[in-house]
Image (cartoon, coloured by chain):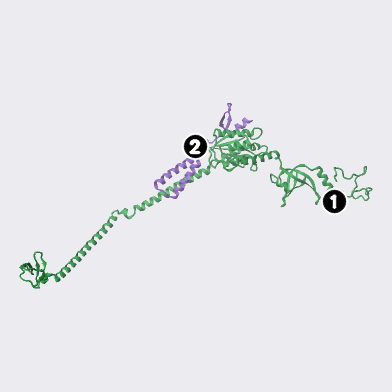
């Protein structure tokens, strides 16, 4: 699997964030626990936002090198078309 | 009776056929008059002999499925149509549904329905046009893989919610790729997309798709892959109906979304994929959530998080304020004052109680003393009586028989006493 999946996936971070919100809204927490949860929630929210914005736009196409190995190169529709022609 | 083509009774040579309305005919004597039934029977034989096992291609119209299970329809082309009937027994063995406007190839015989004098095609078998052998292979492979369990829900992998890297296994110059890239770009601009160019039709197409799926898996190049192409004929889509393609999809560790052709096109790849998208564009929509939706969701959750904590802090602050303003915190000695007061009260009570007790005891004592004085020997002595005690043990003498001559006797008076000696005793 790719690099990204090794870190906390977006979905898990979002789920965690929602769980924290739920428990804080229920309200029966100690001050210490509540602050800990809040910190965790903020961390998750930032992580989610980061996940959504960090990845740069990348469209690559795999080509076979002369050695027969696969290599990912940036994909541009026009250049591919030209090459095809 | 069997009549071949042109075997209807011939007119004598050199004579033309009788013209309708001709008053008299020299051939009246030889003319053969058919009953309607006979004629129809002859026509039927003619037709059945010449069209007993034929294939006809056309479009279905006026389709009616009778409650008896027989179906009635016309087959037509641009200018012409022919009535058709397909009986229940044949209907039941159909692999697809006959319906209006469907182009089909029918096999059967042409015969006559004598009741109406109507010729029609008695259909024994029908195939959707363009399927034929391929259709059969499709059905057979589908059945085989289904029996093997390749389509079972239990094998379906979950599609990641926000895949880090999406692989597109399709042709680089197909419509599918453009559609997918457009949709992805609209939904999530900074997605990471990896195109794996493959042949999607023709010789070697299936092999190139298989190679792509295997390579992506071996090198762990993606979190999810879309395998597909744009619309085309059944032949065009055939690479997605090959067994090797199906097995490669089944064996893929990376979740596979199939996206082949249009919504109506179903391929074996669709059945075995972890998820079937009706079209390549739909696959892109399935695989990538709208970025704006996600951002909104996160910021909404963050806002709620903040509000919840602010709410909690407010509540705690309020509680703290109430505590601070409470009576005991403001006058910490108040608690002691109350206790002191109580203590004083108890002390007072105790004192009062003791005094009362002492007074009671004193009164009781003097009353006892009074009684004692009234009944005691001292008062008697006062009145001149005395008490005699035998010595040495000072035992009160109440009878003379207690005494011996010479015994010493102590006699107590009101004041003082004296000792005397017994000289005589009298009973």
Q: Horizontal and vertical percent for residue B305? A: 45, 46
To which residue does mark 1 refer? B36
Residue visible at 27% across and 59% down in the picture: B342
Residue at horizontal 52 percent and vertical 43 percent from the top: B294
Which dot marks residue A6?
Answer: 2
**What residue is shown at x 44% (from left), y 48% (from top)?**
A24
A50 or B257, nearer to the observer: B257
Instruction: Give the quarter of the image for residue B278.
Output: top right
Q: Which chain is purple?
A: A
Secondary structure beneath disc 2?
helix
Give the quarter of the image for residue B361.
bottom left
- Residue nearest the observer in this picture, B244 or B370: B370
Q: Give the side of residue B335 with respect to residue B29, left or right.
A: left
Which of the chains is green? Answer: B
Q: Is residue B78 visible?
A: no
* Quarter containing the C terminus of chain B: bottom left
């Amino acid at each position: 699997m790719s690099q990204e999946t090794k870190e906390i996936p977006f979905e898990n971070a979002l789920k965690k964030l929602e769980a924290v919100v739920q428990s804080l809204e229920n309200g029966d927490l100690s001050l210490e626990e509540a602050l800990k949860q809040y910190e965790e929630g903020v961390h998750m929210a930032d992580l989610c936002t980061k996940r959504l914005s960090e990845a740069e736009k990348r469209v690559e196409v795999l080509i076979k090198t002369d050695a027969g190995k696969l290599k990912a190169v940036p994909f541009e529709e026009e250049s591919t078309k030209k090459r095809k022609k | 009776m069997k009549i071949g083509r042109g075997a209807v009774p011939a007119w004598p040579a050199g004579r033309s056929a009788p013209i309708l309305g001709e008053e008299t005919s020299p051939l009246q004597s030889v003319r053969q008059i058919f009953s309607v039934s006979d004629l129809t029977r002859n026509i039927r034989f003619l037709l059945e002999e010449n069209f007993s096992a034929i294939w006809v291609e056309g479009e279905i119209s006026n389709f009616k499925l009778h409650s008896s299970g027989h179906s009635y329809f016309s087959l037509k082309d641009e200018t012409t149509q022919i009535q058709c009937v397909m009986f229940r027994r044949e209907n039941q063995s159909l692999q697809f549904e006959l319906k209006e406007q469907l182009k089909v190839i029918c096999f059967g015989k042409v015969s006559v329905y004598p009741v109406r004098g109507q010729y029609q095609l008695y259909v024994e078998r029908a195939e959707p046009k363009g399927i034929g052998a391929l259709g059969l292979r499709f059905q057979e492979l589908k059945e085989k893989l289904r029996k093997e369990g390749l389509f079972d829900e239990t094998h379906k992998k979950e599609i990641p919610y926000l895949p880090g890297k999406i692989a597109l296994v399709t042709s680089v110059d197909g419509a599918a790729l453009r559609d997918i890239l457009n949709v992805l770009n609209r939904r999530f601009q900074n997605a990471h997309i990896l195109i794996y160019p493959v042949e999607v039709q023709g010789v070697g197409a299936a092999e190139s798709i298989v190679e792509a799926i295997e390579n992506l898996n071996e090198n762990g190049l993606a979190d999810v892959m879309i395998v597909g192409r744009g619309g085309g004929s059944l032949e065009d889509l055939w690479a997605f109906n090959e067994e090797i393609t199906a097995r490669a999809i089944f064996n893929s560790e990376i979740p596979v979304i199939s996206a082949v052709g249009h919504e109506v096109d179903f391929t074996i790849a669709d059945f075995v994929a972890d998820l079937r998208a009706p079209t390549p564009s739909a696959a892109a929509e399935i695989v990538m959530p709208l970025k704006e939706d996600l951002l909104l969701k996160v910021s909404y959750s963050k806002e709620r998080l903040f509000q919840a904590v602010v709410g909690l802090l407010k509540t705690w602050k309020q509680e703290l304020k109430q505590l601070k303003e409470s009576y005991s915190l403001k006058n910490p000695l108040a608690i002691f004052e109350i206790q002191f007061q109580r203590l004083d009260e108890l002390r007072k009570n105790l004192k009062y109680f003791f005094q009362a007790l002492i007074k009671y005891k004193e009164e009781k004592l003097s009353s006892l003393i009074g009684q004692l004085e009234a009944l005691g020997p001292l008062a008697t002595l006062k009145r001149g009586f005395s008490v005699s005690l035998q010595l040495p043990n000072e035992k009160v003498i109440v009878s003379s028989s207690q005494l011996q001559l010479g015994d010493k006797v102590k006699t107590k008076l009101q004041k003082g006493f004296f000792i005397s000696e017994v000289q005589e005793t009298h009973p």
